Amino acid sequence: MRITNIEGRLNLLTDDGFADVAGLSRGRFGPGVQDVYRVWEDFRDWARSYEGGDADGATRPDAAIGSPAPRPRQVFAIGLNYRDHAREANLPVPEQPPVFTKFPTSLTGPFGKLVLPSEHVDWEIELVAVVGRLAKRVPAEDGWAHIAGLSIGQDYSERRVQLAGPAPQFSLGKSFPGFGPIGPWLVTPDEFADPDDLELECAIDGESVQKGRTSSMIFGVPELVARLSAVTPLLPGDVIFTGTPAGVGGARRPRRFLKPGESVRSAIEGLGWMSQTCVAAE
Ligand code: ZN
């Protein structure tokens, strides 16, 4: 099952196009998107029984598509979760996942402008997992059962702010407005032959800069659910940015950061793609 956010309204994405959930369900679910995670299992059962026929077949402008989890109560993000990225950062492979947050005002939809607050903004394509069931001290083998679905994210990072001061400021440096695009769809784990092994690729103006597979994560999605929920309950609709593979600009020599006019395209197998066009701050 695939859902999306069209101008703030929950939609099913069917083979025939978009279908507005509030209308289809006669108000039982929707019209808002974030609240559906509070009743995720009821919604999933209802959506599975949907037989189609109500989609209008029309396309939608990219600007109409919002994040499939637009207002999470908690946002978790994981650092150094791919060995090749830890290596390029000259840091040891972590024994515990480094965790930070992206403040909610940084979250946005999958298409649009990325305003560059400085000349030190970096890209990080990431698989995003959205929580579909309250998770408290969940063992890893039950991790996937607590995930509603997967989407594409970018963990845009202002490296100067992130690394300034006596201790790194991961949460701040990664939370400028627009630094957390998510989308274009949320896809349930059962749609994938293997949800633990998806190819992801980030390209700038058509040049591939990151390419990897989520099977290379040090802590996979179920393990992250276990590690995070051992400390903090994961709430329905919460978002987890799961870390980025090698190829970020700050690890290149010379360093490379995003410039006005450049376009960043992020794609993950089975999840589609999203893009942002960089513009200078006014
Ligand atoms: Zn990241």
Image (cartoon, rainbow, N blue to C red):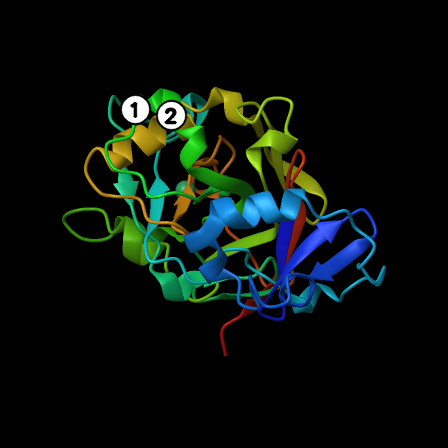
Cβ(mark 1) to ligand 1 < 8 Å?
no
Q: Position of residue 33 (x, y in %)?
A: 53, 62
Residue 106's image quarter?
bottom left
Q: Quarter for ligand 1?
A: top left
Q: 191 or 54: which is nearer to us? A: 54
Q: 258 or 267: which is nearer to us? A: 267
Q: Where is residue 164 in the image (x, y as percent from the top left)?
A: 24, 53
Q: Residue shown at 37%/59% (left/top)? A: 175
Q: Residue shown at 54%/70% (left/top)? A: 280
The reply to whether callout 2 and callout 1 are in contact (CB within 8 Å) is yes
119 up-or-down from 151: above or below: below
- Disc 1 marks which residue? 139
Q: Check disc 2: other Cα within 10 Å, few if <14, some if 14-19, many if 20+.
A: some
Residue 226 visible in this rendered orientation of the protein: yes
Q: Residue 210 carries which label?
A: none
- Disc 2 marks which residue? 142
Q: Which amino acid does label 1 sit on?
A: Pro
Q: Check disc 1: other Cα within 10 Å, few if <14, some if 14-19, many if 20+.
A: some
Residue 176 visible in this rendered orientation of the protein: no
| Apparent side of residue 138 relative to residue 113 in the rendered image (left or right) | left
255 up-or-down from 72: above or below: above
* Quarter containing the N terminus: top right
CA separation, marks 2 and 1?
A: 6 Å
Q: 249 or 52: which is nearer to us? A: 52
Disc 1 element: loop
Q: Position of residue 264 (x, y in %)?
A: 62, 51
